[in-house]
Image (cartoon, rainbow, N blue to C red):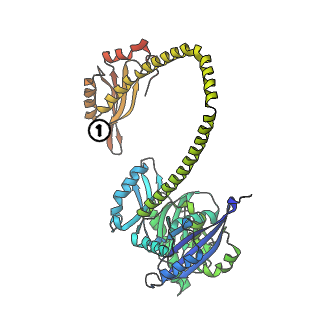
Amino acid sequence: MKFLFGKQKKIITVLELDNDWLKVVQVQVSGQERRISKIIVEQVASSKDDKAPDRISALLKELNVDSSLLTVSIPHQLVVIKSLELPSVNPAEVKDMVELQIGKQTPFTKEEIIYDYEIVSTNAEGYSRITLVIVHQDVVRTYLKTLEKAGLMTERIALSSEGLFDWRKIACKQEASGQPYALIDVDYDMSDFIVILGDKVIFYRNISVGFLQSAEALDKWHAKFIEEINHSIYAYHSEMINEEITRIIITGAEILTTSLNKDILKAVVGLPVDIIPQTENITLTDKCLIGYSGIANNVSLSCLFGLALNPDGIRINLIPQQLQIEKEVREKGKDLYFFGMYLAFILAIASSIFLGRLYTKEQYLKELKQQVAKVQGRVSTISNMIDETETIKLRSNTKNLVLNCIFENHKIIPPDIYLTSIRFNGKDRLTIRGASTIMSEIFKFVNVLEESKYFEDVKTKFVTTRKVKGGDLTEFEIICPLDVNFRNQLNLLDGSLLSEPEED
């Protein structure tokens, strides 16, 4: 029998819905090959037309969408994106800081919003720059209710700009650049402006110019579009002072992108400009390709292409916390199910082995008796080895004396002092190095060490003060000779510890 698990086909679906358009893109996956197999674009009015959700639900049912392979894309204009710089590079601390900051970044209460963030970069000064994405719960609920009517659910609610970033990697076929460049996606009534550096999006902006504004006069639209590009570049440079944009890539609604002249844009904007079709280096099935030209004239599908072709690349997930918890519970349930299966299998094997051994118990017992007779002469040797082992254990336990000393040291450290090293010379002295913003705390620390039962004649080797971030930081080194009684304990058992190397 021949199994073809590797050749099974699956369909990845990406859905986007705003006040004007419903967009659906499906990707057919077969092995390593991925092709756009279906594109649906319909104009709707979800906020005014009560029948729109029913139409969308009926359409999704017709498409036979797999919930586990469904991604929902939220348009950039429906979210709030903030770039924040936080004074930590520890991910756990950054998470706590975001939770404290979230109430200051939006007029809504924390219970009314859904948010997620991505750490974009860190620097040597200990700061992290993050991108914070906030969406009102009503926006997400609208999507989830529509999916529920179609009997669907999703675990991925992505930002459309992330799909644009993933589209760029496929369409441009280039490695991550060390210089920032702008990517503009022209859609029906809005345009998306992002700046990419390396493998991260470092700036987001929404441009209120799209195909809809070009209906009256294309020349006026060109002028307005160029003006918005310049405003976006200015806004970027105001926020990212040291990172100059080196070029611009434009894609989106094909009627508009084909009407642009990159040489004129370069002359006006002052940067090299590339205009790339949405389907550049993207494979469509023959059936899908036939109807594509009419569909993509006045809307952009670049973001959906990117999300559909790289669904695992989502970094911002705006799924409600309740659904995240349900997802975790389901995954744990699957793990328990498979664990139960494995356990039952193991028990069955173990039972078979046990029952098999019952049949040969007498023969095995005889063999054991023969083996015991052979090794009887080695019992004394093993006993001696046990005695030696106990002696080694006893000697190794004396190391706890040094640990007690370090523990005693740790208990008496003032809160304004932090240590950089503790060094024991293996014989009679402990050397402590550290720093404090308050010099007087160092001398108090020396007095406390002097009173400890483990030390005597404690001395300060040096105290040095230097400027750090506008304040004073005092570094020190303290020599702590061990108390006589404590040294005598270390010298027990034939001086077994005196040969040890220095310990930090």
Name the quarter where the N terminus is drawn: bottom right
Q: Report the front residue among 315 and 246.
A: 315
* Residue plotted at (56% across, 51% down): 341
Please give left or right for residue 106 compared with residue 36 in the image.
Answer: left
Classify residue 483 by image quadrant. Answer: top left
Q: How many marks?
A: 1
Q: Residue furthest top?
A: 494
* Residue plotted at (51% across, 15% down): 383
Classify residue 460 by image quadrant. Answer: top left
Amino acid at the residue labelled 1: Asp
Please give left or right for residue 323 compared with residue 277 in the image.
Answer: left
Q: Position of residue 154 (x, y in %)?
A: 50, 67
Please give left or right for residue 355 compared with residue 244 in the image.
Answer: right
* Residue plotted at (46% across, 63% down): 237
Q: Report the front residue among 361 and 149.
A: 361
Q: Report the front residue among 274 and 268.
A: 274
Q: Position of residue 359 (x, y in %)?
A: 63, 35
Name the quarter where the C terminus is drawn: top left
* Residue plotted at (37% across, 30% down): 433
Residue 485: tell me if it is visible: yes
In the rendered view, would you say 406 is above or below 385?
below
Q: Residue furthest right?
A: 1
Q: Position of residue 266 (x, y in %)?
A: 58, 70
Residue 131: tell me if it is visible: no
In the rendered view, would you say 482 is above or below 100?
above
**Mark 1 sits on what residue?**
416
CA neighbours of label 1 inside 10 A, class few (<14), some (14 to 19), many (20+): few
Please give left or right for residue 356 compared with residue 51 in the image.
Answer: right
- SS at mark 1? loop
Q: Position of residue 430 (x, y in %)?
A: 37, 23
